[in-house]
Image (cartoon, grey):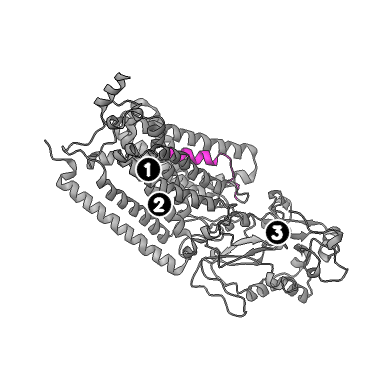
Amino acid sequence: MTVPESRRPHHVAFARIGLGLLVALALLGAAAYGVQAERGLGETDLSREMPWGLYISQFTFLVGVGASAVTVLLPYYVHRQQAFARALMLGELVAVIAVAQAMLCVFVDLGRPSRLLNVILFPAPTSLMFWDFLTLAGYWVLSLVGLGLAWSERARSSLGWSRPLALATIPWAFGIHIVTALLYAGLAARPGWMTAVLAPRFLATAFASGPALLILLAGVLARTRRFDVGREAVARLTTIMTYAALTSAFLALLEVFTALYSGEPGASDHLAYLYVGLDGHFGLVPWAYASGGLLALALVVLLVPRLRARTGLAYGATAAVLAAVLIDKGLCFVTSGFNPSPLGYVRDYRPSLIELGIVAGIYASGALVFAGACRWLPVDRDGEPARLPEEQSVYAWKLPTSTAHRPDMAKVALSEK
Amino acid sequence: MVLVGGAATRTAAGASPAMAAGSPLWGLAIDLARCASRAGCRRCTDVCHSAHRVPTVSDPRHEVKWVWKEPFARVFPEQIQAWDGEARAQMPALVLCNHCTEAPCTKVCPTGATWRRRDGVVAMDEHRCIGCRYCMVACPYGARSFNWDAAVRAPSTSRYPARTAGVVEKCSLCVERIDAGQIPLCVEACGALGAAALTFGNLADVSSPLRRLLSTRQAIRRRPSLGTEPRVFYLTS
């Protein structure tokens, strides 16, 4: 038997260096936040004209990643696809971490973070932000329980309420991202955001970026940690990602049509700022083309069977989808909506080192939690990656709990019916 | 929004609008030509900012402003034609919180730190504000300011409480003066100069000077198509 990959000396060294870097980045982020807390949000590149920037953009992106747990919850709990059992373990973990990171992104954006509880003490039901706080907090708790259920076969099978709870999580996951979209989509002051397709567009980009992240993480885990999500789950996640990305591109193009064909300046100014520049300001133009170009390239690879069959290209396309959504939601969408300002000013936005440091710290902390949690992922003890049995009944959920995880028994149980 | 008013709440001619029976509904009219006739005048801004301890910030990105001048073309872009002269486009127009009847800022605030009073003033509690800036994002007039820098301190020339870093602030229409039966400082200062470009009054009272002005002069409001129903009027004729 070969030495397990994760035990090879150079892997251990890489892992140590990587963990060291993550710890350093997390500490750097904490230090950057210390500076911002001391000196005020003036340490950012935010302004009168650009009140929200990288923090709220990243919040938007991360809520999408959190909501994308739907892409593993639905197949597993509703369509009873046992092949998603392992992807569910990963998906729930990513959701819990992403939502926590999203909440951190809002926290670091607050001018008076010590007053955060005012949102609960003085509830304002007309504010979408109030509902965003509630839905995110609720979803985080649900996901945490869901994570426990996903990781523990025994808990899943012994608790009578586990499936109803998992099912309730699904609309809630949609909900967090819909509410986040409505937070933007109802503002007459920002015509670039005020579109009814924003919520579907957010969901589409979420269901593209989430699976993309899962596929990449699964690839890393399969190589280093003896945890295999399974070929079938990865293949199906790839399909979900592909059509979600295609849908998001379709919705984005519809917005371009409405904006350009109507000819109304208010409807197209933010697009002009994104793609051709406005009043001599071109701050987002390279980013907008990078995002669109990456998405287009990725779709070509993912839709042509001969191309996507090549593992390297497929992973590249997956990374490109993730990067495209990260740029679009994590930077362009929010900041382009502020140009031009209500008084007609255009201001480019370049995140300050403090902002970049804080966001890097949030991501590094999330990665550290992920790496730590992965130690509890189920691992087969024979040194080979734990693999799902190839054959599993899609009706495994209905089987007696004692045989649900035993494909050989499951077949017997099925044939007895 | 139901306008409080009609014969039942009408005040006797000459009485202070603040004495009107029932709830008054405060509004402000700005005579554009009169205001523009005093080039470079910033009396209202200075008086307001000094009394309300609005900090002076040199960085234009971080400025805190309650009432200030902007070029007419920026304030009323839909009123400007390509063949308008540069003078008309650059004519200074005073901007401040519009104290909207349907104020988007009060709708989006997650803590109720900004709200509309019965008398129409959009008020602000800087001690409840968590500094999320959603109100700045939702305001279609750019009327709100955030205290970006902790290092900037407001001058202590008045008893008005200074704000800490990390909260949003804006024109309060001098609620503290209104509640004491006085008119806003900017209106008082402009009148004292002899410019009289600003008229403050009770919109619920048909006989108020403001209502009489609005019934005889042509007035426009900023971005009326948004349905916010501003209560700051700009007299153009």
Disc 2, SS: helix
The residue to which callout 1 is attached is A146
For image coordinates 53% across by 41% down, the residue present is A199
For image coordinates 50% across by 59% down, the residue present is A46
Q: Is residue A213 or residue A140 the one in the foreground?
A: A140
Residue A244 appears in which quarter of the rendering?
A: top left
Residue at mark 3: chain = B
- Where residue A186 appears, as percent x and y from the top left, is 60, 47
Residue at mark 1: chain = A
Q: Is residue B194 or residue A402 the one in the foreground?
A: A402
The residue to which callout 3 is attached is B72
What type is the residue that disc 3 sits on?
Answer: Phe
The residue to which callout 2 is attached is A100
Q: Are marks 3 and 1 in contact (CB under 8 Å)?
A: no
For image coordinates 39% across by 32% down, the residue present is A75
Question: Is A171 on the left-hand or right-hand side of A87?
Answer: right
- Which residue in the rendered view is the most extreme toward the right? B13
- Where residue A294 appears, as percent x and y from the top left, is 41, 39
Res. A282 in view: no
Disc 1, SS: helix
Query: Counting other residues with Cα less than 10 Å from the Cα at mark 1, is it few (<14), some (14-19), or many (20 or more)?
Result: many
Query: Counting other residues with Cα less than 10 Å from the Cα at mark 3, is it few (<14), some (14-19), or many (20 or more)?
Result: many
Give the magenta-colored segment's residue range: A190-207
Question: Is B33 on the left-hand or right-hand side of A174?
Answer: right
Q: Is residue B103 above or below residue A221?
A: below
- Which residue in the rendered view is the most extreme toward the left? A1
Q: Is residue A25 above or below residue A209?
A: below
| Disc marking residue A238 | none
Q: CA distance from mark 2 to mark 1?
A: 15 Å
Viewer-nearest of labels 3 and 1?
Answer: 1
Image quadrant for the C terminus of chain B?
A: bottom right
Q: Is residue B26 above or below residue A339?
A: below
